[in-house]
Image: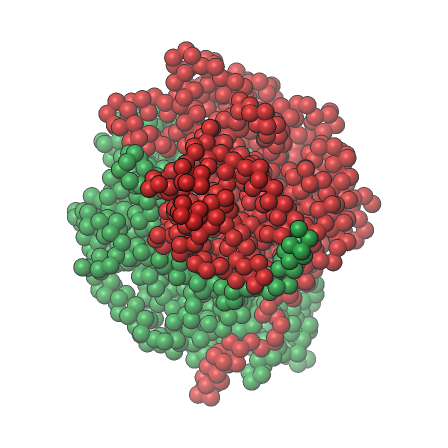
Chain colours: A red, B green
Amino acid sequence: MSRWIQEGDNVDITNEREKGTFDTERLSAWIHGGTDVLKRRREILEFVKSVDDFKDPVPIEFLSREERILNNARKVVAMTDNTDQIDGSDFFGEGMYYQALTMGRDLHAMSLHYVMFIPTLQGQTDDEQLDEWLTKAISRAVVGTYAQTELGHGTNLSKLETTATYDPATEEFVLNSPTITAAKWWPGGLGKSSNYAVVVAQLYTKGECKGPHPFIVQLREDDTHLPLKGIRLGDIGPKLGINGNDNGFLLFDKVRIPRKHLLMRYAKVKPDGTYVAPAHSKLGYGTMVFVRSIMIKDQSTQLAAAATIATRYASVRRQGEITPGKGEVQILDYQTQQFRVFPQLARAFAFMAAATEIRDLYMTVTEQLTHGNTELLAELHVLSSGLKSVVSWDTAQGIEQCRLACGGHGYSQASGFPEIYGYAVGGCTYEGENLVMLLQVARFLMRAAEEVRKGTAKLADIGAYIGRTGAKSSRLTTHHHYTDVQLVEDLEHAARKQVFRAYDRLKKAQQHLKPEDAWNSVSVELAKASRWHVRVYLVKNFLHKVSLAPQDLKFVLVDVARLYAYDIITSSIGAFLEDGYMTSNQMNEIKEGIYECLAKIRPNAVSLVDSWDYDDKELKSVLGRRDGNVYPALLEWAQNSQLNKTEVLPSHTKYLGPMMKDARSKL
Amino acid sequence: MSRWIQEGDNVDITNEREKGTFDTERLSAWIHGGTDVLKRRREILEFVKSVDDFKDPVPIEFLSREERILNNARKVVAMTDNTDQIDGSDFFGEGMYYQALTMGRDLHAMSLHYVMFIPTLQGQTDDEQLDEWLTKAISRAVVGTYAQTELGHGTNLSKLETTATYDPATEEFVLNSPTITAAKWWPGGLGKSSNYAVVVAQLYTKGECKGPHPFIVQLREDDTHLPLKGIRLGDIGPKLGINGNDNGFLLFDKVRIPRKHLLMRYAKVKPDGTYVAPAHSKLGYGTMVFVRSIMIKDQSTQLAAAATIATRYASVRRQGEITPGKGEVQILDYQTQQFRVFPQLARAFAFMAAATEIRDLYMTVTEQLTHGNTELLAELHVLSSGLKSVVSWDTAQGIEQCRLACGGHGYSQASGFPEIYGYAVGGCTYEGENLVMLLQVARFLMRAAEEVRKGTAKLADIGAYIGRTGAKSSRLTTHHHYTDVQLVEDLEHAARKQVFRAYDRLKKAQQHLKPEDAWNSVSVELAKASRWHVRVYLVKNFLHKVSLAPQDLKFVLVDVARLYAYDIITSSIGAFLEDGYMTSNQMNEIKEGIYECLAKIRPNAVSLVDSWDYDDKELKSVLGRRDGNVYPALLEWAQNSQLNKTEVLPSHTKYLGPMMKDARSKL
């Protein structure tokens, strides 16, 4: 008996756990940041399990949208009633875990209140405003959201259509939506739950447009919760995922708000309408960088959940005989299964390692910013944008691979996958569409390439390889003697080559095209360069973290890290062969390396995923249950189906029954 | 004014249509099989639009599962009431189109009745049984499904657990589910709608197991529709897609059925229990091959729908300025957007071309089988298995690319994508899990490779390249002078190389492993070989079809076909470089070829997708509307949200409202 092995468990999964060659508990501590953190996780878990208001009446996939919204509202009030149970300052750790346990993958009415509304107030209000609004927001006297994106306008903020026109006569701003495309669209909790929002609108004063600015706006009346005059808003309808949240739309018909509702830490409008421009132009970064940093952790958590489900299920699922007469084998023994699932497991480890790093960087930058130091802000911006893009895409793909590896049952909502995928894949689009993000990273890379060519480059750490000359060919002999240093050199070679390939094509295009058209004409190559840049970072960071792990964990982590790196290389063979940097023999070595990694990971696979420390309460998957007793649980789960509440449905009574009866009478 | 251009349309989409350089109507006719077919499609469309019972009360994404089931039952009765409106013998054409128009992507209570139940009766009953059951099924006096898969058993039929034990005393079979894992699981319409099923069970007679056999079983009472004694069944709960169907579970507790309910065309059990084995062992193929053949058409239709939505939306969506001050551009002008969407468009064309081919092959085989000729059956089996696997995977990936290319709105169910994806991706798993299918194709390829090595190969058409020697290097000079013949040679080289790579590794592994373990140890390479084999077929077939097109269509189709082929090549650069078959200069030529194809397709993109002839009734996408008036339609669509029926939700009244009020009182 242990945390993972208990009486009554499926025999196959117990065997897997017993043959694991490392201490799961020690790896859990390594992943989550120490035994103290692990202890706190379990305390939080016990607390959440002990509160009735956190219990779902039935698994939430059986609830209608209306029921989910209601269920989530109860839980979010309970969650915020009990924030004293966690260390609120540790949002990346205790905060996210507490929220995942209580709210699942559905978000909730106050998601944007905490992730966007309050941080914006903290970052954009002047002192007087801060006093008033932060107090109200933190006490939950108001529930706010963040309304920026419009029906016809996303990434390109300068084209937002909502206007806020200053009227000096009454010292008010008049908010207006001049067109349908100006409707605010998407903000979480906007449709039904929030009564306030930070609204981003084009500020007009003295007949001039000063660009988009944030305003705090009351949307619904305190007592009745009805929309205020001139405000039209509602839910935007069902989505691929996160249907327990009321993402909303919002239209203004000349709504007046006091002058002081412009958030005035940076830009100001004086009573007479004089506009005072902000001293620094880009200090609005903070919130987005914060959200993107959280996203790396969040995405890695979703991918790890998927890999956990697929690995555990593959250990209890038996199908097909490898050796006739020996009985059906665990599908985890199929090489094709390992090849599908283990790279996802490896990615999840790599992304978690990056999440820790980006959290630390975010903390450092936040600390620096309080002293007005913006040194690392640009680097954090580039890195978080690039990581967000690569990690969210690989995560989405990886989740689907894990789902498909579970066969038919992966398609059932009992598996948890539809929910996990729907939730995670949104990350490819929100907080900066992935391709747009990659092209932002490419701006940095093209500047770096330009400086390298000019000999003026001063590239710190992450981008330093761009300025190096590098070898003409890989030093790889056999994969058994392939060092971390050589491996990173090879990846850096591929990345550098793509950076300069894009750069040279850009320069060439600029000779006959306008700069913007030239940029567009090479944008596929630019995006590719950015992906390489981020992948190099991911591998380096993961290898580095593994190199610091204690010996009794390192030996297993090394295989995981190698699988992650080899998978990247063999997914882009051309990048290493096309300039003769590697030979096909060398590439074959890496392919062999993959098969070896798969075989070495196989006996520890279940213990590896156990070490992520998912409780069933968090995982929410019948296929991924700790105890491996999947089939009875599936049958039990299905009994909750809405359709099983009545034996004979109206569809029979009204349509199919009469049709059959009529036909029988004519036979 | 024309079919596609109408008054009041979005100006941008009209411009796109006006600048198209070919006749959309002529391409539609080419795609669908002639002007007569096109005319019939429009007649069917008009008919469907004219029948009230086919109208959804609100877009179906706003319905609960119970409401969807009810809505679908009304429609399916109307659909089958009116089959005289179509040519029922043309299932691939009129049948599928009629069903898509009436039922959408939700399937229905009688899907398996028509696709599995009736064909199984036709294929597996003796003459007496046929008379009785086919009459009942066709008249709709019974609604049947096909119950084979079990909770714990899918692909490996020999391990099914449901038993049918013959009792000569009463001349009955006793159906029993000895364990939970024996529960029948997944059959469409089994949960609530069907009252009959073909049940596959292990036949026991005289103490011996004779393997899985099909039985016809009544599940529910004629008049009350209540389950018969000993039968426990119900819905298996919500899924990733197709939630308007009641996929079900079914458990037998010693249920007795007459001896004559064994379908006895091939195997028989005599009254005394004597088992008569079938003369031919593999004649059960028919139904699965039929379903897989339909799937190619069905999947290509889904991918084409996705490409239609993404292309049309990208033509009306403006975002970002390429040239400052010139206004926001259509996102279809971004190279990255073209690079995401156009390859999906090209795939859809390629898959449709394959669907036609496989339909013709299926027809030929069916005709041959009536004369006892099984010559082409194996080929059809291999080809349909391989195509099913490659096409369903590429389709799923392609749909998601199209969705992501639509930014945030792609995530809304208004886009249609969540429905399309959920529906299509199921195809990766049902009717033979994709990897299992690929490994079946690999068995054929390994036999072929063996014969080639032995000099005994007689490979027809599709596999002939395996036996050729081929050149040592590609004949490609520039992509402008790259002929179809050279292109196919190059793809065949890559495929052949992978076939023999897998073969050689298999032989090597067999030296020290048991055959089955050897097979498993190279299965990743085997699956890869199968994918290449299928892709070569897809390209050859598409190029061939295009080569036969009339000149006024060929010029645009050529670019589409080239994009399809180039995309395959550049996605596997290593396959062409690793043995020095291509140089990196040659590969660069192909990369340039892609950019040129993108640019050439750009002005015809909207007309190309129009030519698939989707009516809004079939497409069901606010983003993909013919008229391009997306934004007002999105706002209107959202008003249907379940959450918008009440201004203040119970979640506020019960939980969030009191929380805020309490906080306000303490401020």
Q: Quadrant of residue A443?
A: top left
> Residue reaching furthest left?
B551
Give the image location of residue A338, x and y in percent: 60, 40
Q: Quadrant of residue B514?
A: top right
Give the image location of residue A472, x and y in percent: 45, 14
Q: Is residue B504 left or right of residue B617?
A: right
Give the image location of residue A620, x and y in percent: 65, 52
Q: Residue at x 19, y 59 (%)?
A: B2
Q: Pick whichever, A76 or B507, lies toward us.
A: A76
| Above or below: residue B401 compared with residue A246 | above
> Residue reaching furthest right?
A1
Give the image location of residue B58, x and y in percent: 43, 68
> Residue reaching furthest top?
A455
**Does residue A633 show up?**
yes
Locate the C terminus of chain A by quadrant: bottom left
Q: How many marks?
A: 0
**Does residue A303 show up?**
no
Q: Residue at x 72, y 40 (%)?
A: A87
Locate the N terminus of chain A by quadrant: top right
Q: Pick whichever, A234 or B142, lies toward us.
A: A234
Q: Pick whichever, B364 or B112, lies toward us.
A: B112
Q: Residue at x 34, y 28 (%)?
A: B587
> Residue reaching furthest bottom?
A665
